[in-house]
Image (spheres, rainbow, N blue to C red):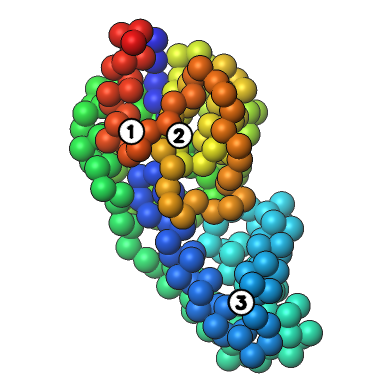
Amino acid sequence: MIEAIGLDADDTLWENETFFRVTESEFVAMLSDHCDSEAVTGRLYEVERRNLARYGFGIKGFMLSMVQTAIELTDGRVDGRTIGRILDLGQEMLAHPVDLIAGVPQALDAMSGRRLILITKGDLIDQERKIAASGLAERFESVEILADKTPESYARVLDRHAIRPDRFLMAGNSMKSDVLPVLELGGFAAFIPHDLTWVAEHADAPDHTRLHQLATIADLPKLLACLEAGT
């Protein structure tokens, strides 16, 4: 039944949002003399959403959004030292080691021999860096780095690999990006929640027979076996 499995990367295979939250906390503290924490986080989120069309997803866009937020919240009075520290924070994120989520190597080992495709989105250079640093690249038949995850972008990936949507399963932590677009195409989805998924990736879960929620990625091989057994 399942010919190929797509796996998300950030917060599915390795930690990602954790580092954004740590950086955001320091950014909020830097602007504490100008605004309370809720005002800073709220404005930062607004700026990030506005900038997605310009900068896409990833650390570099986040860095530029922090700079813009600092300028807006201080009416342009933010000092160069603060801007410099924001840039340092972004560069520290870009250089951070890749921390695999528990159970990932074992789950991939259990699916060895299957058609595994890594499907991630975001900044090309940073995603390539993380994939190389993860040591997981050789586990996958192919790596696809998308600007965004939409039904159209998934359709292009499946067409490129000659995979029928009804024989494809996508696993990831984002209901918005890893589940809904694939269900729309007629595929299967395994939702593996992460405690710190970015709010922009949240969406309501549909009542759908092809949607399965797992506690951890360690449950994915068993799900595949059950689907293929028709149980």
Residue occupied by mark 1: 140
Marks 3 and 2: which is nearer the front?
A: 3
Q: Residues within 10 Å of mark 1 (few under 14, many from 20)?
A: some
Residue occupied by mark 2: 191
Q: Nearer the viewer, residue 182 or 162?
A: 182
Callout 3 secondary element: helix
Q: Position of residue 164 (x, y in %)?
A: 50, 13
Quarter containing the C terminus = top left
Marks 1 and 2: which is nearer the front?
A: 2
**Quarter of the view holding residue 108:** top left
Labels 3 and 2 touching (C-beta < 8 A): no
**Quarter of the view holding residue 73:** bottom right
Residue occupied by mark 3: 37
Q: Amino acid at mark 1?
A: Phe
Q: Residue at x 57, y 33 (%)?
A: 205
Callout 1 secondary element: loop
The alpha-carbon separation of the residues under discs 3 and 2 comes to 31 Å
Q: Residue at x 53, y 62 (%)?
A: 59
